[in-house]
Each structure stands twice: as C-alpha cells, then as structure tokens.
C-alpha cells in the first residue's frame, strides 16, 4: 500500500501539468494548443528510484545480486526514463515485469503477460526470469573495444576469472580498451546503455603457447555457463557470441580460461526491450479559403504527403470577426483530410487559411 500511495503522490503534479491547457479555446492564429508535456523534477525521479529499490531490493539480494550496485544503475536509468514507463513500473507486481516495462516493454506484450500469468500461478518471482521480447541495437559508432590484455601487459591467468566492465564507465583504458574508432577513448560507454539485457560480443583469443578453452559469461554466474572459444598452442581463435549482462553488478561480464592467454574483447551491439520512438512530423503548406459574408462553413485542408498520417489541423485567420468554430479529421474523404470550420461575422467575405500536421513512425 505504501508503494502505491507514494506513486500517487509522485504523479499528482504531473496530472496538473498535463491538464494545464484543458480550458484553452484558441491559440493565436486560431490553432488549438498542444497539451503541455508531462515532466518530472529530479527530486520526483529520485523518489521513484528509492521506491523501486525499497520494493525490490530483497528480490535482488535473494538471488545473490549486489543491491547497492543495482540501485546505483537503477537510479541512473530512472533519471532519464520515460514518464509513462515509470508510472507502469511502479504498478508492476514482480521484479521481472517492473524492469521490463521500465525499459519500455509494452505491458500488453506476450512476454510480460506470460510473466504476469506465471507469477499469479506460482505466487513467487525470481530474479532473471526471461523477458524474451528484446531487440538488438548495433552500437552507433561501430565496434567498441572494451578490453585488450596485450595493451595492459596482463594475460589472463589460467583458472582465474577476471571481470570486464562495459557500462557506466568513462574510459576502458584500465582494461586495455580504447572505445571506438570514432572517439578513441571509450567515452560515453560507446553508446552502451545502462541495464542492457545482453551484449553482442566479438572475442579474440591470442594463444601464449598453451591450448585450452576461453569462457565469457555473465558476471556472478559460474564460468561453465559462458560461451566458449577453443584455442591451441599455435593458433589463435575468435568467435562472435551473445552474453547476458549482469544488471545487479557494477561490472557486467566475466572471463575465464583454462590456461594463460591474451584476449581482445569488442562489443558490437546490445539487446534491450523495445524503446519508444518519437514520431516524425511535418506540416503541409497553408491553403487559402474564402468565407462569404455572414457564412458558417468548413473547408478540407491539404492532404499529407504519402506515408504520413493526418493527426491535427492547423487553422489560421488574420481577419477580425472571423472565428474558428471547430476542427478535426474528416473521415468522409478518401485521404482523411483535416478540416477547419469557420464563421464570418463580417458584411464582406474574408480569407482564412488551413493546413495539416502530419506524422509517421520513422522508417521506410
């Protein structure tokens, strides 16, 4: 109950903000104003992060995760997360579904619904339950070199695991990495976000004269769960693998080898739940219309370009005594044109203008 009361308090101010223009009639020029975007202050986001940590820390602890490290990552993510996702995350009954919707997974998706149904049947929730609907994103500047043992003159000792940091790090130099070709120093994590579900990694093992196997795996898990690269005493080896990233660890990956070897590790992309994408919008040119003296009428505005959809009319009158009496999308036209309704109270005709705001989901 405490969690939901805090959630209600956190979002109370956003309700006021979102309805600030509810009583407005016409903006200058006759266009209807857009609603104000819902915003959260840094303090409100901090309250949300603390609420989530208090709610789910025990789940992280039971599964061997480091609560402090997880809380730090979560706090960074909440600091920039979408407001709608935050609202839904506060309402989720399990750790898995909370993390999924926080990162943009739709509540109606099959994987979230399946996780909710399983939690209802079993009555418990375990950290790491699969949320399958993740998408792959290549790094914006290509491959990111996060580690190279040759640069730091430190081959991996056989039988001794070593951690590899990939997220929330200003430079990979301590691991022998140099980031991407574009930035050269690993700044901004090469575009690797916090709380990535998994990483696409290219691994090269440079033999030091021994033979054996090399493992790369999620930090905190046994090395036997990792992906394997086999090498011989004379021949180096490489492989491209997908590795689960530890979300409750300060350092996400780990490596292990059966004998001493040098290694090079490049991250080329990451997996996360699908993220919300802003619409791509444009506005048609304004078209002029003549409203007869004392007339009340409406006009269809110009159609949107091919591939765009009419979402909002734009109505403008530069004449006194001519008023916009409504607007919308005319479903009776083949192109779903927007329209503006006009009333001319003058004794002579007047010119008015109308256009359409058009949007589409980015892509081809």
Image (cartoon, helix red, strand yellow):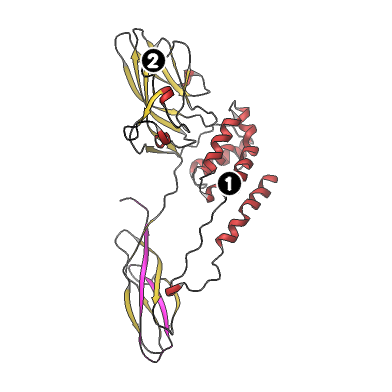
Front-lying residue, 236 or 96: 236
Start-end of magenta stretch: 335-364
Q: Nearer the viewer, mark 2 or mark 1?
A: 2
Q: Which mark is residue 104?
A: none
Give how far apart the Cα atoms at labels 2 and 1 are. 43 Å
Front-lying residue, 201 or 92: 201
Which picture quadrant has residue 296? bottom left
What residue is shown at x 44% (from left), y 10% (from top)?
158
Q: Position of residue 242 (x, y in %)?
A: 40, 28
Q: Which mark is residue 45?
A: 1
Q: Which mark is residue 153?
A: 2
Which picture quadrant has residue 214? top left
The answer to whether residue 113 shows anywhere in this view is no
Q: Position of residue 78 (x, y in %)?
A: 54, 43
Q: Main secondary structure of the magenta part?
A: strand
Q: Position of 121 compared to 222: left or right?
A: right
Which residue is farthest right?
Answer: 1
Relative to 44, say whether 334 is above or below.
below
Which residue is farthest bottom?
Answer: 347
Let me know if residue 147 is in the magenta part: no
The local secondary structure at tag 2 comes to: loop
What residue is shown at x 35% (from left), y 52% (from top)?
362
Let me know if residue 359 is in the magenta part: yes
The answer to whether residue 217 shows anywhere in this view is yes
The local secondary structure at tag 1 comes to: helix
Q: Check if mark 2's residue and mark 1's residue have beta carbons within 8 Å.
A: no
């Amino acid at each position: 109950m405490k969690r939901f009361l805090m959630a209600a308090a956190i979002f109370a101010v956003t309700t006021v903000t979102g309805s600030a223009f509810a009583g407005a009639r016409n903006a200058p020029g006759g266009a209807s104003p857009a609603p104000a975007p819902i915003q959260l202050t840094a303090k409100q986001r901090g309250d949300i992060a603390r609420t989530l940590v208090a709610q789910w820390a025990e789940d992280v602890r039971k599964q061997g995760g480091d609560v402090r490290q997880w809380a730090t990552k979560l706090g960074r993510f909440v600091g920039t997360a979408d407001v709608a996702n935050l609202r839904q995350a506060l309402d989720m009954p399990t750790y898995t579904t909370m993390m999924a919707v926080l990162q943009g997974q739709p509540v109606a998706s099959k994987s979230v619904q399946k996780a909710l149904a399983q939690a209802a049947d079993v009555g418990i929730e375990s950290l790491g339950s699969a949320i399958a609907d993740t998408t792959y994103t290549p790094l914006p500047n290509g491959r990111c070199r996060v580690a190279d043992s040759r640069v730091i003159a430190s081959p991996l000792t056989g039988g001794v695991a070593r951690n590899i940091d990939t997220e929330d790090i200003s430079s990979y130099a301590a691991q022998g990495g140099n980031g991407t070709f574009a930035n050269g120093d690993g700044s901004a994590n090469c575009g690797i976000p916090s709380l990535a579900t998994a990483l696409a990694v290219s691994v090269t093992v440079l033999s030091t004269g021994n033979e054996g196997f090399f493992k790369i795996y999620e930090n905190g898990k046994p090395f036997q769960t990792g992906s394997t690269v086999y090498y011989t005493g004379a021949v180096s080896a490489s492989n491209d693998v997908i590795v689960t990233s530890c979300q409750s660890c300060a350092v996400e990956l780990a490596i292990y080898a059966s004998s001493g070897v040098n290694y090079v590790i490049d991250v080329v992309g990451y997996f996360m739940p699908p993220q919300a994408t802003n619409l791509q919008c444009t506005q048609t040119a304004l078209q002029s219309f003549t409203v007869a003296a004392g007339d009340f009428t409406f006009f269809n505005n110009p159609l949107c370009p091919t591939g765009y959809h009419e979402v909002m009319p734009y109505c403008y009158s530069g004449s006194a005594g001519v008023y916009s009496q409504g607007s919308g999308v005319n479903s009776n036209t083949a192109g779903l044109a927007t329209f503006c309704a006009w009333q001319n109270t003058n004794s002579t005709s007047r010119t008015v203008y109308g256009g359409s705001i058009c949007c589409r989901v980015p892509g081809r």
